[in-house]
Image: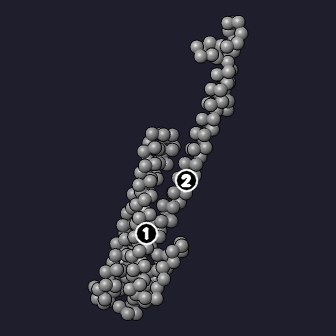
């Protein structure tokens, strides 16, 4: 690595963190895919277990992004004249193109490292778009499943309330002279 070793090390750190974030997102994609399949099967036990995995991977992704931003800020300080936009959706690719221009002027020997960072940032950007589409779909499916379970719960609560009004604690009808009566349980669709 030619040029300033400190800049080269910071540049490599940003590249490594991009690849680490990519790997964590790949693992997270597997969890999302499993959850979507469990929703399709209405497997509540599996969904509960997957929820714990989602929380763990959510924290991992958040930590990786925070660490990547810190490394980008350190590199920006070292390079000078480069800002890291905290809320820009294209933050990484914009940052890489800005850093690339500036570093190539002052440190042409870092071409290989810059090319590698550029490749990882594009790979990460494309994968991010792919996985976030799956996350959006997952959020919709989870919301619909929750609505369905709320409606089902409300239905059975209403049935239980109606049943309690007709039957006593022993399970026999409260009203009437002991003759047979029709059940109040009606099928609702």
> In which quadrant is the C terminus drawn?
top right
Q: Quadrant of residue 10?
A: bottom left
Name the image quarter holding the N terminus. bottom left
Residue 118 appears in view: no
Q: Secondary structure at mark 1?
A: helix
- Residue at image position (46%, 85%) is 82
Q: What colour-coding does the image apply?
A: one colour
Report which quarter residue 148 is drawn in. top right
Location of residue 22 with respect to 73 vertically, above or below: above
Residue at the spot x=63%, y=38% of the render? 151
In the picture of the structure, the residue carrying the numbered disc 1 is 66
Circles 2 and 1: CB distance less than 8 Å? Answer: no
Q: Which residue is the extreme one toward the bottom?
A: 106
Q: Residues within 10 Å of mark 2 (few under 14, many from 20)?
A: some
User: Separation of disc 2 and disc 1 at Cα?
Assistant: 23 Å
Q: For residue 153, which numbered disc appears in the image?
A: none
- Compared to 6, does 183 lie above or below? above
Rendered location of residue 185, percent (x, y) = 66, 22
Classify residue 115 as left or right of residue 160: left
Residue at screen point 49% across, 48% down: 36
Q: Which residue is mark 2?
A: 139
* N-terminal label among 2 and 1: 1
Vertical relation: 53 (above or below) 74: above
In the image shown, does 4 or 105 lie closer to the viewer?
4
């Amino acid at each position: 690595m030619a040029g300033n070793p400190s800049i080269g090390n910071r540049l490599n750190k940003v590249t490594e963190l991009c690849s680490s974030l990519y790997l964590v997102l790949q693992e997270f994609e597997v969890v999302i895919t499993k959850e979507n399949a469990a929703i399709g099967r209405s497997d509540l036990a599996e969904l509960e277990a997957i929820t714990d995995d989602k929380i763990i991977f959510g924290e991992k992704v958040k930590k990786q992004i925070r660490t990547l931003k810190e490394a980008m800020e350190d590199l920006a300080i070292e390079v000078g004249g480069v800002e890291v936009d905290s809320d820009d959706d294209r933050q990484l690719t914009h940052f890489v193109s800005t850093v690339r221009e500036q570093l190539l002027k002052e440190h042409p020997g870092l071409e290989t490292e810059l090319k590698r960072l550029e490749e990882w940032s594009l790979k990460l950007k494309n994968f991010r778009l792919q996985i976030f589409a799956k996350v959006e779909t997952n959020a919709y499916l989870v919301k619909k499943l929750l609505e369905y379970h709320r409606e089902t719960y409300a239905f059975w609560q209403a049935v239980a309330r109606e049943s309690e009004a007709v039957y006593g604690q022993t399970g026999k009808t409260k009203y009437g002279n002991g003759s047979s009566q029709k059940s109040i349980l009606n099928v609702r669709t």
